[in-house]
Image (cartoon, helix red, strand yellow):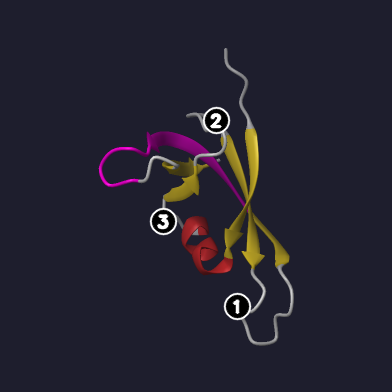
Amino acid sequence: MKNTLIHELKLHTKYFDSVVDMSKPFEVRKYDRNYRVGDELLLKEFIPKGWFEEWEEDSVTGQICHRVITYVLKGGEYGIDKDYVILGLARK
């Protein structure tokens, strides 16, 4: 049995609610980790500096979303850059 990894990642605030309500059941990420089906994502809502006029520094809001990877589509085909991956997501 493989060891399940939990990947802690920041998720831009403009995508966060769509992942939470599952209208966006996927995530596009740089393929800089060994993502595998069954691994978990702990997504932390992130507001980058300047996103709102009053926002003067990068900030994590404290909101989190926990998802399981159900599919991994590696780049290099279908117009997806080889350095990226598309992850299918399901609720934990």
- In the image, what residue type sits under mark 1? Trp
Q: Residue at x 39, y 36 (%)?
A: 74
Q: Residue at x 52, y 29 (%)?
A: 38
- Residue 27, horizontal then vertical, whole percent: 46, 49
Q: Which residue is mark 1?
A: 51
Q: Quadrant of residue 48?
A: bottom right
Q: Which residues are magenta?
A: 65-80
Label 1, residues with CA under 10 Å away: few <14, some 14-19, many ≥20? some
Asked if residue 73 lies left or right of residue 48, the reply is left
Reading the chain from its start, which is encountered first: label 2 or label 1? 2
Q: CA distance from mark 2 to mark 1?
A: 30 Å
Q: Position of residue 76 (x, y in %)?
A: 33, 38
Which part of the image, by quadrant, shows the C terminus?
top right
Q: Is residue 7 above or below residue 12?
A: above
User: Residue 34 shows which numbered tag?
Assistant: 2
Which secondary structure dominates the residues rendered in magenta? Answer: strand
**Residue closest to the eye, 54 or 76:** 76
The answer for how far apart the CA atoms under marks 2 and 3 are is: 22 Å
